[in-house]
Each structure stands twice: as C-alpha cells, then as structure tokens.
Amino acid sequence: MLEKAALKVLLVEDVRMIRAMILNQLAELGVTEVPTASDGGQALETLGREPDVDIILCDWHMEPMDGLTFCARVRSHPGLGGRHIPVVFMTCDDRLADSDKRRRTLEPAKGLGIVGILLKPLTTDDLRAALTRYTHFDPVTGAG
C-alpha cells in the first residue's frame, strides 16, 4: 500500500507571532512541510524555490507586497502560475464575518486563485476545514 504524500502549505504572514501560532496549529494537524514568508515578495521567492506547494495560506494586508498583488504576480508568472495553487486569504477584517459580504468580496478575486477567506484569529478547526475543502487533506491521517 502506498503512503499518501504529505501536504505542503506555503504560509505567508507578516506578523511573526501569528505565523508561529499557525505553524503550531498546522503541526497539530500533522502538516509539517510549511515553508514561510513574511510578505508577498518573499513568498514569490519561496515559491520560485519550492513550487510544489499544495495550498497557500496568505495574509491579505501586508507590506510591502500585499496578498492580492502576490496572487496576481503568481498567476502572471509563467513558472509559477502554470499550476493553479489554491489560495486561502487570512484577515482580521471583521467586516468579512458576514458570509454574504465575504462571498461578494471573494467573487472578483477567484480569477487570482483565491478560493476562501479565513478570519483571524484562526482556530485549528478553521485550518482543518480549509485544508480539507481545498486540498486532498485527510484530517484523520494529516496526509495530503
């Protein structure tokens, strides 16, 4: 029997404490292959070195390159955008707590590969649900 491949998640988050918290939550889920970046520019460099990620968890508001700009550059770069990697945005914007507003905000971003929005602070259950919905993640084994 072949073992499932581990899920690889690119985590793009500018706040070190939040990045560490999400890394711990992913580890609780059995996801340990998680390259990180603190802004969109670093994420592009990381993705250039490690293009085989299964999903990107990306903060929406970062400096100097925000999440939308990062996603647009990924989609426009032939080496990075050839494979459509799902992107889940993370934000503290509590205006998006309303599911209808979140849906309306997400609609124009879908062309950039953005498949969902998670509100911070994230829970392990939030991450499990997103990974299960947008990848082949198995929440029982933690495998992708």
Image: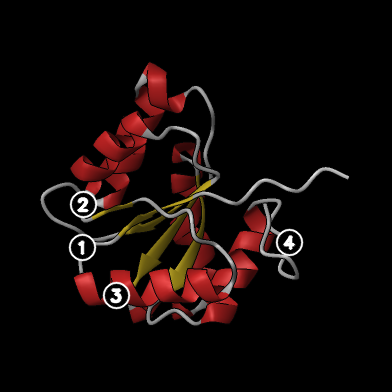
Q: CA distance from mark 1 to mark 2?
A: 6 Å
Q: Label 2 amino acid?
A: Asp
Q: Nearer the viewer, residue 99 or 38?
A: 38
Residue 98 visible within the image: yes
Residue corresponding to mark 1: 14
Q: Secondary structure at mark 3?
A: helix
Q: Residue at x 45, y 46 (%)?
A: 108
Please, is residue 120 above or below residue 66 in the view? below
Q: Which residue is denoted by mark 2 in the rendering? A: 39
**Alpha-carbon neighbours of circle 1 within 10 Å: few (<14), some, or many (≥20)?**
many
Q: From the top left corner, tell me how far across and down residue 133 is, in percent.
A: 68, 60
Query: Does 59 sit left or right of 142 as displayed?
Result: left
Amino acid beneath label 1 = Asp
Kindly report the distance in space between the C-alpha atoms of the residues bearing marks 4 and 3: 24 Å
The three-letter code of the residue at mark 3 reads Ile
In primary-sequence order, the first of circles 1 and 2 is 1
Q: CA distance from mark 3 to mark 1?
A: 8 Å
Distance CA(mark 2)–CA(mark 3): 13 Å
Residue visible at 53% across and 79% down in the picture: 124
Is disc 4 in contact with disc 3, using a CB cutoff of under 8 Å? Answer: no
Q: Are the residues at dot 1 and dot 2 in contact (C-beta closer than 8 Å)?
A: yes
Q: Name the mark on residue 138.
A: 4
Q: Which residue is mark 3?
A: 18
Q: Nearer the viewer, residue 81 or 48?
A: 48
Element at badge 2?
loop
Sequence-wise, the earlier of marks 2 and 4 is 2
Mark 4 surroundings within 10 Å by alpha-carbon count, few (fewer than 14), some (14 through 19), many (20 or more): some
Residue shown at the point (20%, 70%) measured from the top left: 15
Which quarter of the picture shows residue 74?
top left
